[in-house]
Image (tube, helix red, strand yellow):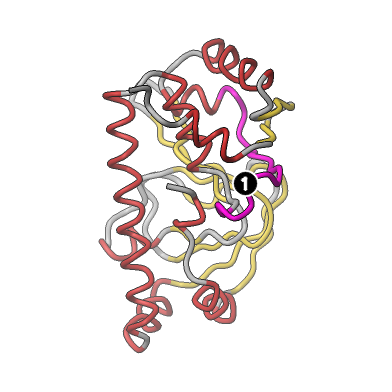
Amino acid sequence: MLAADLLLPPEVRQELLLLAQRQLLEDRQWVCQSGDPAEALFGVVRGTLRVSVLAPNGAEAVVSVLEPGHWFGDISLFSALPRFNHVQAVGPAEIAVIPASEFHALIARRPDIHMAFTKLLSHRLRVMMAWIDDVILHPLPVRLATRLLAIDHRSQDEPYRSHFVNMSQDDLAASLGVSRQSVNRQLKLWEKDGTLRVHYRRIELLNLKQLMAHAQPCA
């Protein structure tokens, strides 16, 4: 499933932006950390945010990269539980912030927006279940291709337009539970066949259809 499936409809995002306040972030500035109270809904207006989790031993795993158009924090708002992820700016960024009380008032008077978030949460659950299946069943090349597709923001109608994924090889490796060297070896193979190009702390995806083919398990 492509990350485009994990975006709210454009008209809903526009309604949210009209209600939100803007906040500028510096590089590495925290938006929220695990255990923080759920006080707002957030949207990415400009820049990139890094979503991670920390193990008790201090090990970190990046679980997602959020770019403009993504809204987050709704799970904690719906569940009334503290944040469970760390979210940090990667370079300068701008976010939209809607206080929890205003968000709850909005979805109470707008069932269509409530339904949009329900669909979004369902999509996220399917992606999570697919990720669990990948970890259990599939080899690294399939898992890596699936991970890159999950954070790519093109539609399937734009298979040959290149796109940069702002995620380092270290973060990719941590999110997959493998070594950086293993990820680097596979990315170099895909450079040779024209699927992508490796840059410093980001990856340029060149051929979406080819990457989708790499994500298919061998028969």
- Viewer-closest of 23 and 65: 65
Label 1: which residue? Answer: 159
Residue 155 screen position, x and y as percent: 57, 54
Report the quarter where the C terminus lies.
top left
71 relative to 169 in the view: left or right: left
Q: Residue at x 64, y 52 (%)?
A: 158
Question: Given the current orientation, which residue lies at the most extreme front position?
Answer: 219
- Viewer-closest of 23 and 111: 111
Residue 199 screen position, x and y as percent: 74, 27
52 relative to 82 in the view: left or right: right
- Viewer-closest of 109 and 219: 219
| Disc 1 secondary structure class | loop
Q: Is residue 13 above or below residue 79?
A: below
Q: Is residue 77 above or below residue 167?
A: below
2 relative to 198 in the view: left or right: left
Quadrant of residue 65 in the image?
top right
Q: Is residue 138 above or below residue 73?
A: above
- Image: magenta residue range: 155-170
